[in-house]
Image: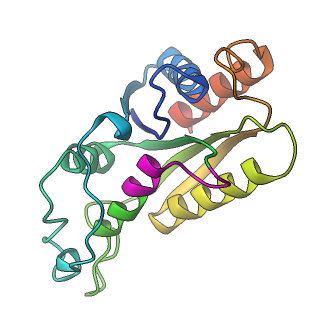
Amino acid sequence: MEIVAIMGSPRGGGNTATLVEAVFEGARAEGAVCTRFDPARLHISDCDADRACLESAEAGCILQDDMQQIYAALRRADAWVLATPVYFWHVTAPMKRVIDRLYAFFTEEGGWRLGLEGKRRGGVIVVQADPGGDTPQRVAAYLSQVLGELNVETVGAIAEGGIGDPGDAAARADLLEKAGELGRKLATG
């Protein structure tokens, strides 16, 4: 069992990362191997809409950058986690860059989900500093939709406001437990 997380926060050790690590802790307790990618620390170009990825089932994305590592990891993974803080009412720029580049998994010749045969499980983590409103839930629904388009069933989501200052997530035993439970669920089905 392999779980891959895309951690969209520019803060490598912030609240989003804390919750991803709690997911991994729960998953590792069930024997899963876990890998985290931090797009803010990788060279990932914007999708240039050249549509070369749509030409054939073998094409894939022709942009040769660190996204190629992510494609390979997502192809072999049994479960995916998309995790982001809310920036200006949506996902962060590094997360959006990855999402746009996931378009390479589709083709126009009917071979949708290039290299993504079979069902996968997914999880979503969204945190924001503002304690009010429904933005975390709306962003989580968007990420679940992204997963669904790629044949990944969202089996759990954490969408929480009031998590902005360093250490806020670590101070919330209820969130850490929820994240650990998500990891166990991803690892065991």
Asked if residue 97 lies in the magenta stretch, the reply is yes
Residue drawn at 31 percent across, 66 percent down:
105
Q: Nearer the viewer, residue 87 or 49?
A: 87
Residue drawn at 73 percent across, 29 percent down:
163
**Residue found at the very far bottom of the displayed protein:** 109
Vertical position of residue 146 compared to residue 57: above or below: above
What is the x, y in percent for residue 147?
51, 58
Q: Nearer the viewer, residue 30 or 23?
A: 23
Q: Where the N terminus falls, by quadrant?
A: top left
Asked if residue 169 lies in the magenta stretch, the reply is no
Vertical position of residue 42 compared to residue 183: above or below: below
Q: Where the C terminus falls, by quadrant?
A: top right
Position of 16 with respect to 73 (left or right) is right
**Residue found at the very far front of the displayed protein:** 88
Can you tell which quarter of the image residue 165 is in? Answer: top right
Residue drawn at 77 percent across, 14 percent down:
173
Vertical position of residue 152 compared to residue 126: above or below: below
Can you tell which quarter of the image residue 106 is in? Answer: bottom left
What is the x, y in percent for residue 57?
18, 75
Position of 180 with respect to 37 (left or right) is right
State how the image is colored: rainbow
**Residue found at the very far right of the displayed protein:** 132
What is the x, y in percent for residue 133?
86, 50
Position of 13 with respect to 36 (left or right) is right
What is the x, y in percent for residue 55?
17, 83
**Residue range corresponding to the magenta coloring:** 88-98
